[in-house]
Image (cartoon, rainbow, N blue to C red):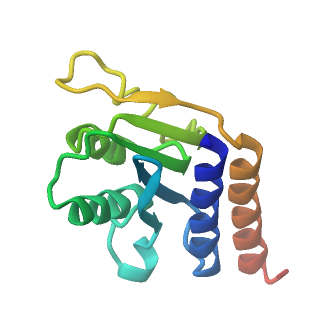
Amino acid sequence: MIEKYMREALREAKKAMELEEVPIGAVIVKDGQIIARAHNLRETFKDPIAHAEILAIQKAAKFLGGWRLSGCDLYVTVEPCPMCAGAIILSRIDTLVIGTMDPKGGGAGSLFNIPEDNRLNHQTKVIRGILKNECAQLMKDFFKYLRNKKSGCS
């Protein structure tokens, strides 16, 4: 079941890639049902916080009619940045499922580990490495595409 939801997050990431956005996708699941899905839209919206996780959290809160996302699990293709990791804690998400890690900017185990920091008033369980290779390959393909486009070798 865990891979099924990560595949849905990958589907969202591919939507971002089609828009030439960094291909990160997220889905939020409650009681076995996807209640929110999103992908990066920073370039599209010209908004520095239009990350997949933030957009999915906003949609889930609207769907549930409140900001507390207790009982929800967030699946994301790439490790959340510190901003998104903070939003995950603040929204009270139970479990964070990550595809591939982000050693240069990750806030959920790479540079920081905000979701599991017991100094905070809420902790989120973290599961890492689900469909890791597919999630990592999508990122590699995207940045290769950008490099080729920039050099005129598309």
Compared with residue 64, is residue 77 higher up or lower down, i.e. above or below? Answer: above
Tell me if residue 60 comes above or below residue 74 in the rendering. Answer: below
Is residue 52 found left or right of 59 in the rendered image? right
Residue at 56 percent of width and 72 percent of height: 16
Residue 55 location (% of width, % of height): 35, 64
Quadrant position of the N terminus in the picture: top right
In the image, taking residue 49 as reference, residue 40 lies left or right, namely right
Q: Residue furthest right?
A: 153
Viewer can see residue 55: yes
The residue at the point 47 percent across, 29 percent down is 126
Q: Position of residue 92 (x, y in %)?
A: 24, 38
> At which x and y percent is residue 71?
31, 39
Is 131 located above or below residue 53 in the figure? above
Q: Which quadrant holds the C terminus?
A: bottom right
55 vs 63, nearest the viewer:
63
So how many labels did they put on this image?
Answer: 0
Can residue 112 be spotted in the picture?
A: no
Q: Residue at x 60, y 41 (%)?
A: 2
Q: Residue at x 49, y 57 (%)?
A: 26
**Image-based side of 57 in relation to 99, left or right:** left
Q: Is residue 82 left or right of residue 118?
A: right
